[in-house]
Structures are given as structure tokens and as C-alpha cells.
Amino acid sequence: MIAYQKLTKKELDTFIQMRIRQLREEGAKEDIDLVPALQDYYHRHMADGTFVSWLAMDEDRIVGTSGMSFVEKPPYFGCPSGKMGLLSSMFTDPEYRRKGIAKELLSRVVEEARAYGCGTVQITASDMGVLLYTDFGFVKNGNFMQYKL
């Protein structure tokens, strides 16, 4: 039986390891130790309420993760509040996939964004995640661009 709970500092080390597993699975090339930067980010943003995560648990084992970062930019017509959710850390252990866990986690973090006052949620989806997000109601934005500094 899968249970769901919010991420706390107690689960943070395991959560970070699962985030790194997710990035590797998506094909990220590792050239730095990302753990210190992730620890810093999550500690700061969990403390100030601008990051929230729901976990899927099989007894005491984390089998699925989600994350939502809250950011604010000047309001625009598509998002009059200017508050946006940035979805990340969507990962389900391979042996637990295709059981509805990711959909449940997604529902929970999207509700967190709604409660925070976000007018939109964005994600850069992996190939594996596209179907989940389109089925949920996400639409592609062909104008997304990025400039690496």
C-alpha cells in the first residue's frame, strides 16, 4: 500500500539521491558534485516555503518524488498573479511505475501551487513524462527558449 507524505528534512538525503538518479536517467552529464548545491537549495527553500515536495512511500521506503518551486515575476495576461510553479523532481522508482503514483504526486504538488496563488505551472518534461503531463492537461509552449550562462 502506497502512502503519501510531504518531504521533511528527515528524508532530504534520500530525496537528493533520487533527484540525482532522475537527472542521470534523463541523460544529464555529470561534471560536478551536485549534492552540496541541492542541499543548500532545499534547506533554504523548504524553510521559506518556496519549495514543497510530496513523496510516495512503500512503508519506510521512498518510491516516488515530486517537487514544486514557487517563483514570482511581473504579472502578465496569462498569469495575472505573476506567481508561477516550477515543477521538478518527478521521479518514480522503476519497479513502481505505471501504478498511478506519478499522477497522484503531480495532483498534490499542483494543488500546492494553486494554494500558493500560482496562475501557472511550468515544467521541462522528459520524453518519459510527456504523456503524464499532457494527460493531466499541460500544453506545450513552443516559444520556450534558454540561454546558458
Image (spheres, helix red, strand yellow):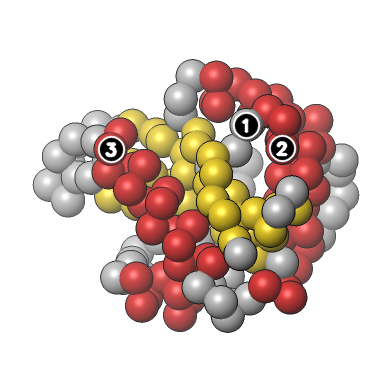
38 shown above or below 23: above
Residue 11: which numbered mark, if any?
A: 2
Q: Position of residue 8 (x, y in %)?
A: 62, 31
- Is 78 situated left or right of 145 in this image? left
Specify the quadrant that holds the N terminus.
bottom right
Q: Position of residue 40 (x, y in %)?
A: 70, 25
Q: Residues within 10 Å of mark 3 (few under 14, many from 20)?
A: few
The CA span between labels 3 and 2 is: 24 Å
Q: Quadrant of residue 35?
A: top right
Mark toward the viewer: 3 or 2:
2
Q: CB under 8 Å between callouts 2 and 1?
A: yes
The residue sitting at 52% across, 66% down in the picture is 102
Task: Please state which of residues 64 and 67 is positioned toward the viewer in this rendering.
Answer: 64
- Is 59 situated left or right of 127 in this image? right
Q: What secondary structure is found at the residue carrying circle 2?
A: helix
Q: What secondary structure is found at the residue carrying circle 3?
A: helix
Q: Residues within 10 Å of mark 2 (few under 14, many from 20)?
A: few
Q: Position of residue 15 (x, y in %)?
A: 71, 45
Residue at which label 3 appears: 115
The amino acid pointed to by label 1 is Thr
The residue sitting at 45% across, 62% down in the picture is 104
Dot 3 or dot 2: first in sequence order is 2
